[in-house]
Image (cartoon, rainbow, N blue to C red):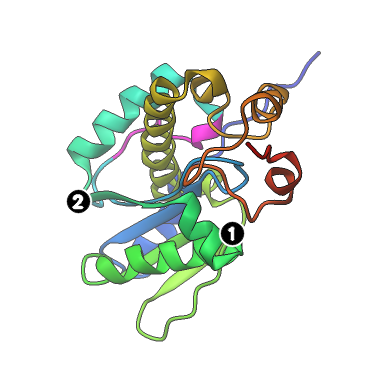
Amino acid sequence: MKKTKEKVNLYELDNQYYSQGYKTIGGIDEVGRGCWAGPLVVGLVIFPREYINNEINDSKKLSKLKRDKLYEEIKQNAIVADTIFISSSQVDLENNIKTSTKNAMMILADKYKNRADAFLIDGEKLVSKDIKYDTYIKGDSKSMCIAAASIIAKVERDRYMEQLAKDYPQYGFDKHKGYGTELHKNAIIKHGTIANQHRFSYEPIKNLSKKK
C-alpha cells in the first residue's frame, strides 16, 4: 500500500516565535535565482498573528490557479506583502547571484524592520546587527510566512515574464519563465540574447550568445 506524505504544519515554526513573545514575524523568500533571463524577485510577508490559511504552501507545490488565488488573499490580509525586483543587469553588475539575493533580502528586511519583531529567511544568512532574523533551509516548506513570501514573489515574477513574452514572443518566456530549458536554449541560438533581460554573467548565456 502506497504511503501518502503527510503535509507539514507550516504554522508550527511560526508559532514557536509567537510562544517566545514575538508579536509579529515576517517571512522572506526569493524566486528566479537560477534563471537565465528576467529579474530576481524577493518577497516579504508579515501577517497578523491571528491570520490562518491552511492552503498556503511552498509556491513550487501549488498550481498557477491556486497561486493566483492565494496571491490575492495574501495581499488582502497581510500587514505587509511587498516585493523587490533585481534586474538581470544588476545581477550581472554584482556578478554573484548569492550577493544579489542577500542584498535584496537585506533591503526588504531593513525597510520593514520596524514592522516585524523577527524575520524568517529562506536559505540565506544576512549581515546585520540591528535586525533579528533566522535562516531556514527550504524555509518555504517549513514556515507559513516564508511560503507566503514565495507565492507573492513567484506570481509577480511570472506575470513579468508573461508580459515580456508579448514583447519577445520568439523566446517563449511565458512557457519557461526564463529558466534554462531546451526551448529557451534553442531560442537564444536562433535569435541571440536580449540586452537587459538575459544574465550575461551566467556561463550558459556567455556560451550561447549569438553575435549579430
Label the magenta part by its dominant secondary structure: loop
Of residues 40 and 135, the one nearer the viewer is: 40
Horizontal relation, residue 10 to residue 68: left or right: right
- Residue extending farthest to the top is 1
- Residue 208 vertical placement versus 97 (above, below): above
- Residue 177 vertical placement versus 18 (above, below): above
C-alpha separation, residue under disc 2 versus residue under disc 1: 29 Å
Q: Secondary structure at mark 2?
A: loop
Q: Which residue is identified by label 1?
A: 97
State if disc 1 and disc 2 touch (CB < 8 Å): no
Q: Which residue is identified by label 2?
A: 79
The first of marks 2 and 1 along the sequence is 2
Q: Secondary structure at mark 1?
A: helix
Q: Which residues are magenta?
A: 52-60
The residue under the point 68% across, 41% down is: 209
The residue under the point 67% across, 34% down is: 180
Across and down, in percent, residue 39 comes to 46, 46
Across and down, in percent, residue 100 comes to 51, 63
- Residue 126 vertical placement versus 182 (above, below): below
Magenta includes 170?
A: no
Dot 1 amino acid type: Ile
Q: Residues within 10 Å of mark 2 (few under 14, many from 20)?
A: some
The residue under the point 39% across, 75% down is: 132
Across and down, in percent, residue 205 comes to 68, 44
